[in-house]
């Protein structure tokens, strides 16, 4: 990161119950022990994945994509009775640690493979794929493209996939108000911004996670803009998003979150309804100041999803208008959530965050 680019920070970790910002990290190979610890301690997530694995792993040849260093789901599959597991991990250090974890279970048939699953070959096809590469926007880590490739090259025709489906929803918010007007990031998260910019090739208006925000943060109804069903092999990305403002106030962007069905018959895990390792994502409108709104105003957006330059990670674009309930007057509105590149400090929140 250019040394002239500085992140506005506040000292210490986030205050309990407070709304805070942190950079999107799941989309990039920058996981460290702190992030892995958060994943290990996510009981809501882990319980659902173990239940789904227990139901379908017995006797199966399993492919895990993105195993991490702890081989959580690989070992869960072996414990459930899988015959063998191919565990793929793209980060070399995490793969080395995964190999050490596998050696601690010498009786288990585990092969750790270092690399990108879209660029390797397996010695056989698997009957179960576990791919916990679901983003805070469901598809943002590239799961749709990765699983489409796995279906073509790595899996049997009848293979089961875990997770089964993920939908991404959005509603209007005013992040500036949620932050109390103080646009800053807890200091421990600032190094991740540098790591994202290094991976992306330079500064840009990166995705921001919003911790501490729940349903009460929304200023509007919610709508779905991405619906990925891996069991039905149906991926609907983008389309039209219509949101009705539900109370007087102002808005400066969208808050996006996921509903995740780990197994086909699961009640979806709603990441805005309780604490998980998946935080809501802020998608800022390109505005100089928040838009004043009244209950009954309509936000109409057309959502386009396009692959980033790597062909794997999607980027999300929102274009439309806010229609005033009383007068019918229309205000143009646009937003973007990119994987890399694009403008820098083009939004109100990014200008406040980066000095």
Image (tube, rainbow, N blue to C red):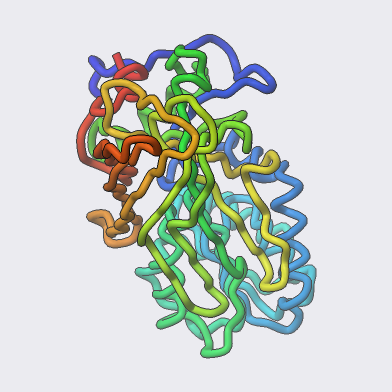
Front residue (pair 136, 25): 136
Residue 144 lies, in percent from the top left, at 43, 66
Q: How many numbered badges does the structure rendering display?
A: 0
Q: Is any atom of residue 82 visible in this view?
A: yes
Q: Image height check: is 5 above or below 261?
A: above
Residue 184: x %, y % from top left: 44, 16
At 42% from the left and 39% from the top, the residue drawn is: 297
**Nearest to the observer: residue 234 or residue 31:** 234
Q: Camera-side residue: 355 or 288?
A: 288
Residue farthest to the bottom? Answer: 157
Where residue 325 sits in the image (x, y, percent)?
40, 38
Q: Residue furthest front?
A: 326
Q: Quadrant of the N terminus?
A: top left
Whether residue 133 is situated above or below residue 53 in the rendered picture: above
Residue in the image at 44% along x and 36% along y: 282
- Residue at image point 65% right, 38% down: 38
Residue 323 placement: quadrant: top left
Is residue 78 left or right of 62 when viewed as pictured? right
Q: Quadrant of the C terminus?
A: top left
In the figure, is residue 327 to the left or right of 250?
left
Q: Residue furthest top?
A: 11
Visible in this render: residue 197? no
């Amino acid at each position: 990161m250019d040394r002239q680019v500085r992140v506005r920070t506040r000292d210490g970790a986030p205050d309990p119950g407070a709304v805070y910002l942190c950079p999107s990290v799941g989309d990039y190979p920058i996981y460290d022990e702190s992030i892995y610890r958060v994943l290990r301690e996510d009981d809501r997530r882990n319980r659902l994945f173990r239940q789904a694995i227990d139901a379908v792993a017995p006797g199966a040849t399993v492919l895990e994509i993105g195993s991490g260093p702890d081989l959580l789901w690989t070992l869960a599959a072996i414990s459930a009775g899988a015959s063998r597991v191919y565990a793929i991990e793209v980060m070399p250090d995490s793969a080395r640690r995964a190999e050490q974890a596998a050696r601690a279970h010498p009786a288990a048939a585990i092969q750790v493979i270092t690399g990108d699953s879209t660029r390797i070959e397996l010695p056989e096809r698997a009957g179960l794929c576990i791919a916990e590469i679901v983003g805070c926007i469901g598809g943002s880590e590239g799961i749709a493209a990765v699983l489409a490739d796995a279906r073509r090259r790595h899996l049997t025709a009848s293979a089961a996939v875990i997770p089964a489906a993920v939908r991404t929803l959005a509603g209007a918010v005013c992040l500036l108000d949620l932050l109390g007007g103080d646009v800053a990031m807890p200091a421990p998260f600032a190094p991740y911004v540098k790591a994202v910019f290094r991976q992306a090739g330079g500064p840009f208006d990166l995705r921001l996670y919003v911790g501490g925000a729940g349903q009460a943060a929304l200023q509007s109804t919610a709508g779905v803009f991405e619906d990925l069903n891996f069991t039905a092999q149906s991926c609907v990305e983008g389309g039209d998003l219509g949101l009705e403002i539900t109370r007087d106030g102002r808005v400066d962007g969208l808050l996006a979150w996921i509903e995740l069905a780990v197994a086909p018959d699961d009640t979806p895990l709603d990441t805005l309804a309780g604490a998980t390792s998946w935080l809501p994502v802020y998608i800022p409108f390109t505005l100089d100041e928040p838009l004043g709104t009244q209950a009954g105003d309509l936000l109409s957006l057309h959502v386009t999803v396009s692959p980033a330059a790597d062909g794997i990670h999607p980027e999300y674009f929102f274009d439309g208008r806010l229609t005033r309930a009383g007068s019918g007057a229309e205000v143009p509105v646009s937003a973007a959530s990119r994987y890399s590149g694009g403008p820098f400090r083009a939004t109100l929140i990014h200008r406040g965050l980066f000095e």
